[in-house]
Image (cartoon, grey):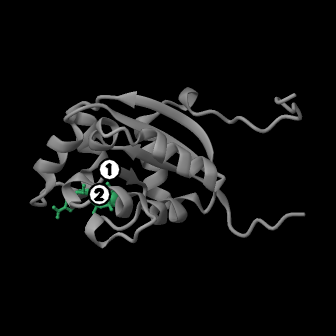
């Protein structure tokens, strides 16, 4: 039985400082786990400016760039890598629109956010962005290639 339409892939998801301080880390993890995705990397980090400049290089020069870097650099974030079928596209759907006011209920931003400048969570928007962001935030040995074992775990 193999109904896997599309490729298994990896995406970079990050709970932003507002999400961490509002206690939404568990909610983000829960939704991705229960959707069926596999967690392969996770860490808390207070990102230095240089890391954020690289992460958000596509937005350099835009009017929201400086406030954006101040916001994301204001405290620790929780960086993660999730793996599974179409996780890049589906992950973005689970986040909702950039502006939480335009995000559908049932999405993370649509359930917990109101303004664009405090939108709780980041997700890679393409295959190339996912690869770039995973390489930027994690060393290779911080990303696990774990697989399910035959152990039943519960007795
Ligand atoms: P993200 O990269 O964080 O997953 O968000 P996104 O793709 O939905 O949105 P993007 O266009 O990449 O913008 C990155 C982040 O910058 C802030 N932003 N503010 N005031 C504004 O007009 C504005 N536009 C974007 C948001 O925090 C957005 O998530
Ligand atoms: Mg983006």
Residue 49, quarter of the rendered image: top left
Q: Nearer the viewer, residue 147 or 99?
A: 99
Query: Is 123 situated left or right of 142 in this image?
Result: left
Residue under numbered circle 2: 113
Q: Earlier in the sequence, mark 1 or mark 2?
A: 2
Mark 1–mark 2 distance (CA, rounded to whole Å): 7 Å
Task: Rate crowding at label 1 as few (under 14), some (14 to 19) or many (20 or more) other CA atoms within 10 Å.
Answer: many
Residue 12 shows in this picture: yes
- The percent position of residue 35, horizontal first and vertical second, equals 62, 56
Q: Quadrant of the C terminus?
A: top right
Q: Tell me which residue sits at (49%, 30%) in the image.
A: 139
- The percent position of residue 143, horizontal first and vertical second, equals 57, 33
Query: Is 152 situated left or right of 146 in this image?
Result: right
Asked whether disc 1 touches disc 2, contact meaning CB atoms under 8 Å apart, the reply is: yes
Mark 1: C-beta under 8 Å from nearest atom of ligand 1: no
Classify mark 1: helix, strand or loop. Answer: loop
Q: Tell me which residue sits at (18%, 49%) in the image.
A: 68
Query: Is 104 situated left or right of 131 in this image?
Result: left
Q: Nearer the viewer, residue 98 or 111?
A: 111
Is residue 34 placed above or below 88 in the rendered structure? above
Residue under numbered circle 1: 120
């Amino acid at each position: 039985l193999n109904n896997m339409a599309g490729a298994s892939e990896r995406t970079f998801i990050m709970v932003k400082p507002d999400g961490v301080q509002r206690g939404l880390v568990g909610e983000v993890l829960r939704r991705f786990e229960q959707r069926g995705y596999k967690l392969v990397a996770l860490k808390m980090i207070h990102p230095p400016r240089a890391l954020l400049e690289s992460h958000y290089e596509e937005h350099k020069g835009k009017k929201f760039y400086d406030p954006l870097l101040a916001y994301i650099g204001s405290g620790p974030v929780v960086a993660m890598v999730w793996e599974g079928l179409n996780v890049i596209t589906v992950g973005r759907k689970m986040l909702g629109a950039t502006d939480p006011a335009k995000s559908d209920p049932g999405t993370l931003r649509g359930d917990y956010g109101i303004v664009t400048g405090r939108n709780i969570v980041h997700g890679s928007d393409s295959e190339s962005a996912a690869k770039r962001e995973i390489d930027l935030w994690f060393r290779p040995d911080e990303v696990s290639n774990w697989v399910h074992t035959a152990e039943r775990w519960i007795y």
